[in-house]
Image: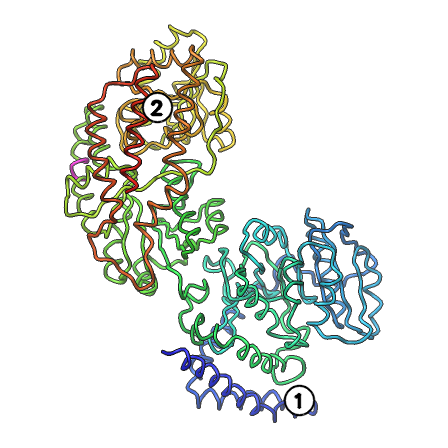
């Protein structure tokens, strides 16, 4: 459709609305004489109009749903203030150097204004603020009541300015760096300010943040707004359950109602405040958000901030009478002002809600499926998935997360939602096949994590979606299981490894591309299945790397691991039984800290003379452990993939001793880290690092440089987006592997053979100098 035709359709829709508005003139004329008759007449005209324009079934469905929800709704939302408020008892916090200025315009409805102020007093914020109440020349008998409230700045207009101009006037008087526009017919609930301010402060491309608006009976009133191509608006989620996942993640929206809207004061003033073409009220908030977006600033919806809104108290609900009638007139002004934007960036009325609510008409939608919500403080796989989510969000795509167990995970689910990821969970959530049947056509790319999950969802994905399917295996499961079976002499596990091999082969063929955390594993997979599309991806990334550090005094050795992973239990027991006694023979004061999530009974039993076990430590405590320890060990005898505990030690500059299994996927690591698989040689390497400060500092420097060159956020972004991100409408042919990935895999194949043939690293500096040169060659090869 041409641009001129789209604009013409927008103007046609506006003209049709003008006809309807004029048709309701008779109802407006009857309002003063008989409101009941006027209401019946208005409904009759609308009924005829909807029938003639084939909209009756749509409005009937809305009416039936609203009636059902009203019947099922609770009587009142807990925390709502219903009793009369004595203004003489109200005391609000008033800062002389406020960060936030709360602007409350009011005209009459003093009891509502007092309850609004009482709610602010009942839910104080630690953020310094001032509350400005601007009275628009109300001369009723209760006009003096507001002057009795302590802690507000009360401003009285000499004449009636209307809502819009009152807001602009109050903004000019405000001292705060941020303006919180708040209707007087609202009541704030706990956490009403802090989450909104955090978004505005922490994200440099945000212009405004809106709250979740609730009806007094607890139903959802607005979870951000949608503006359609004809200029009409939707309060997304209206009358729905406010706890539903769809309404509980931070997202970019077309606009948020100024009933509870936070904006930077300098930006608001630079824009000239609300545009006075919309005076006295209506569409000024939508226009503000559009003007912010014109400046490159987003409007975000923050569900963690909740505000009760007594809709219609100020101006009623009938668009045929009073100030509310300006809503119809101002819509025409809005459509004429933003005709081009509406035509190019907005859907027709009611179409494409799935994308419209996220402003995703021109953005990719990526669905990520994993076994559960990531728990990055508990396992390395979750740390990788969390980093992937961050990269995708920073790339500007819309991210949806489907936990295969559909379980809500307290704290972790909210983390994803706060990042801007919609998470599907709860007993009311439809099964995956039903969901993808309804929404599969909206998804551009699917990122599947782990073989068990991928096997369950890949068939319905192929049936109901044309999305590009990317499979991330975390490691070669069959390879790891086969190694473990060899170490433990477990024939049952060996047969399970053979079965897993067939399952992984099948997934490589079903996916458009399969990703693995190292060039080594990707090259192994390609050697086994040359016709599959397999590529490496950087599995971990960090924004901070340790500065150069002096040798740490002390004799603490640490082993960090998640013990839900069987190879880590075997490693801890092998180290304690066969290696640690040899270390204590050299350094009697050496002591071992085993740190990790969910230690098994066998691991807990290792605690004793010189050995401590610490379970489920925080990130802060783990960082402190890396800083105070003298040596890190990763004594794995089986496993696959790049090990987070190895990369963390490299990043922290804590000299490391590991096995060939621990060094997997890290080309050239044996040139700067001592890699040993025999107990005596392993113990001798640890002893050297415990005693020799010069050796310690030299290896520490090399480790930090190695980590910084390979595990930056930029490195992960480049490798992941090449495999995952595709333009709207572009579906690459299956089996295609990005060129850089093919080159990296070739380099990896060569690197594996050279590394396997290399002698174990010595403590001398000359051997490492050549290794660093070889590592640079590999880096260049992988970047071609």
Residue matched to label 1: 31
Q: Could you tell me how far apart the alpha carbons at marks 2 and 1 are, in whole angstroms?
A: 81 Å
Helix, strand or loop at mark 1: loop
Q: How many numbered discs sit on the rendered protein?
A: 2
Q: In the image shown, does 222 or 336 lie closer to the viewer?
A: 336
Residue ID at (42%, 40%): 375
Instruction: Give the x, y percent position of residue 392.
Output: 40, 51
Q: Main secondary structure of the magenta part?
A: helix
Instruction: Quickly name the residue at label 2.
Output: 634
Percent across and percent down for residue 346 are: 45, 71
Label 1 crowding class (10 Å Cα cut-off): few <14, some 14-19, many 20+?
A: some
Q: Quadrant of residue 73?
A: bottom right
- The image's mark for residue 683 is none
**Of marks 2 and 1, which one's residue comes earlier in the chain?**
1
Give coordinates of residue 433: x percent, y percent.
Answer: 29, 59
Residue 141 image position (x, y, % from top left): 84, 73
Stretch in magenta: 496-500
Q: Is residue 386 above or below residue 399?
A: above
**At x 55% / y 64%, what residue is drawn?**
219
């Amino acid at each position: 459709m041409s641009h001129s035709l789209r604009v013409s359709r927008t103007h046609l829709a506006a003209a049709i609305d003008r006809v309807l508005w004029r048709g309701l003139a008779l109802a407006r004329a009857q309002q003063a004489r008989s409101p009941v008759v006027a209401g019946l007449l208005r409904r009759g005209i609308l009924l005829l109009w909807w029938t003639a324009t084939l909209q009756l079934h749509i409005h009937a469905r809305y009416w039936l749903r609203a009636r059902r929800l009203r019947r099922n709704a609770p009587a009142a939302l807990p925390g709502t203030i219903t009793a009369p408020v004595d203004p003489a008892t109200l005391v609000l916090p008033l800062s002389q150097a406020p960060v936030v200025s709360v602007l409350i315009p009011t005209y009459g409805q003093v009891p509502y204004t007092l309850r609004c102020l009482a709610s602010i007093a009942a839910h104080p914020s630690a953020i310094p603020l001032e509350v400005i109440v601007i009275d628009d020349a109300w001369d009723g008998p209760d006009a003096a009541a507001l002057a009795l409230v302590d802690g507000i700045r009360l401003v009285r207009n000499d004449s009636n300015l209307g809502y819009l101009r009152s807001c602009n006037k109050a903004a000019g008087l405000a001292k705060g760096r941020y303006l919180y526009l708040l209707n007087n017919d609202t009541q704030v609930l706990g956490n009403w300010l802090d989450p909104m301010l955090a978004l505005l402060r922490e994200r440099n491309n945000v212009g405004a943040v809106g709250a979740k608006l609730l009806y007094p009976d607890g139903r959802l009133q607005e979870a951000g707004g949608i503006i359609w191509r004809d200029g009409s608006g939707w309060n997304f989620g209206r009358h729905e359950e406010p706890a539903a996942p769809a309404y509980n993640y931070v997202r970019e929206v077309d606009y948020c109602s100024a009933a509870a809207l936070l904006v930077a004061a300098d930006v608001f003033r630079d824009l000239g405040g609300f545009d006075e073409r919309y005076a006295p009220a209506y569409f000024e908030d939508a226009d503000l958000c559009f003007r912010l977006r014109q400046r490159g600033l987003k409007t975000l919806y923050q569900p963690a901030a909740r505000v009760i809104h007594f809709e219609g108290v100020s101006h009623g609900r009938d668009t045929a009478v009073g100030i509310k009638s300006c809503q119809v007139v101002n819509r025409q002004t809005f459509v004429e002002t933003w005709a081009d934007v509406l035509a190019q960036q907005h859907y027709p009325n009611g179409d494409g809600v799935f994308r419209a609510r996220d402003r995703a008409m021109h953005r990719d939608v990526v669905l990520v499926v994993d076994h559960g919500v990531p728990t990055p403080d508990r396992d390395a796989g979750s740390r990788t998935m969390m980093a992937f989510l961050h990269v995708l969000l920073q790339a500007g795509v819309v991210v949806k997360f489907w936990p295969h167990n559909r379980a809500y995970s307290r704290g972790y689910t909210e983390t994803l939602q706060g990042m801007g990821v919609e998470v599907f969970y709860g007993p009311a959530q439809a099964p995956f096949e039903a969901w993808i049947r309804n929404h599969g056509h909206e998804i551009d790319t699917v990122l599947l994590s782990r073989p068990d999950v991928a096997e369950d969802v890949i068939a319905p994905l192929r049936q109901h979606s044309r999305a590009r399917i990317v499979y991330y295996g975390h490691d070669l499961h069959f390879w790891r299981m086969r190694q473990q079976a060899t170490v433990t002499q477990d024939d049952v596990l060996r047969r399970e490894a053979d079965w897993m091999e067939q399952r992984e082969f099948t997934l490589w063929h079903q996916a458009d591309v399969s990703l693995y955390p190292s060039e080594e594993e990707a090259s192994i997979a390609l050697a086994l299945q040359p016709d599959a599309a397999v590529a490496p991806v950087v599995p971990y990334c960090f924004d901070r790397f340790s500065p150069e550090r002096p040798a740490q005094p002390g004799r603490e050795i640490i082993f960090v691991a998640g013990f839900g992973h069987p190879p880590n239990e075997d490693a801890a027991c092998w180290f304690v039984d066969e290696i640690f006694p040899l270390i204590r023979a050299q350094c009697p004061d050496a002591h071992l800290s085993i740190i990790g999530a969910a230690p098994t009974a066998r691991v807990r039993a290792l605690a004793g003379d010189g050995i401590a076990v610490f379970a489920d430590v925080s990130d802060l405590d783990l960082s402190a452990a890396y800083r105070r320890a003298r040596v890190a060990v990763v004594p794995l005898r089986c496993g696959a993939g790049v090990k987070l505990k190895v990369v963390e030690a490299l990043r922290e500059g804590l000299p490391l001793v590991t096995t060939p299994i621990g060094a997997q996927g890290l080309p050239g690591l044996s040139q700067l880290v001592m890699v040993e698989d025999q107990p005596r040689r392993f113990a001798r390497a640890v002893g050297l690092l415990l005693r020799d400060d010069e050796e310690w500092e030299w290896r520490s420097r090399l480790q930090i440089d190695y980590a910084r060159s390979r595990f930056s956020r930029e490195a992960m972004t480049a490798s992941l987006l090449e495999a995952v991100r595709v333009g709207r409408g572009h579906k690459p042919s299956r089996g295609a592997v990005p060129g850089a990935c093919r080159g990296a895999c070739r380099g990896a194949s060569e690197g594996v053979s050279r590394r396997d043939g290399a002698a174990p690293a010595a403590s001398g500096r000359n051997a490492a100098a050549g290794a660093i040169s070889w590592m640079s060659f590999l880096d260049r090869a992988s970047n071609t």
